[in-house]
Amino acid sequence: MRVIIQRVNHSQVTVDGEIIGKIGRGLNLLVGIAETDTEIELNWMARKCLELRLFPDPETNTGKWEKSVQEIGGELLVVSQFTLYGDCRKGRRPSFDRSAPPEKAEKLYELFVEKLRLSGLNVKTGKFGALMQVLIENDGPVTLTLEKEANP
């Protein structure tokens, strides 16, 4: 499982000209599901996304990242993105052999979103499998890649 985490001032996703998910301060999560992923990877990734200290504490004003999205009461926008498993090493067209098939990926993506919602934070999503436009105002900029591979 791969997740690109972006700390944002605001973010939104649009499908067919309609805004379907919109958040303020928090994290934009671009989520790729691998063919080998299971609930074990989802649990680890959800905990990591919620607990990573990516926000400064305005009270200490040190500039250090001391607070998690949970601690600041931030919001999450979760967007499925199978292209995170695109392999461009050979040829001129990416291969997506490591991406989970759509049926499996959608189930795991929805389960991941459910796990994030258990935090009580406002969680918005894109639309699985749709052509989406994602508007991101990255704060920092802060962009990190998280990966959790399934153990065979």
Image (tube, helix red, strand yellow):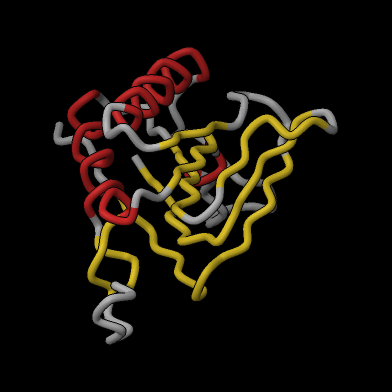
- Viewer-proximal residue among 75 and 150: 75
Using the image, determine if residue 152 lies above or below residue 138.
above
Corner quadrant of residue 22: top right
Q: Quadrant of the N terminus?
A: top left
Corner quadrant of residue 37: top left
> Residue at horizontal 40%, vertical 47%?
3
Identify the residue at the far right of this view: 17
> Residue at horizontal 45%, vertical 65%?
143
Horizontal relation, residue 20 to residue 66: left or right: right
> Residue at horizontal 25%, vertical 57%?
52
> Residue at horizontal 35%, vertical 20%?
111
- Viewer-proximal residue among 106 and 74: 74
Using the image, determine if residue 116 lies above or below residue 128.
below
Horizontal relation, residue 91 to residue 7: left or right: right
State the count of labels: 0
Residue 131 percent location from the top left of the image: 73, 32
- Viewer-proximal residue among 126 and 82: 126
Residue 10 percent location from the top left of the image: 59, 55
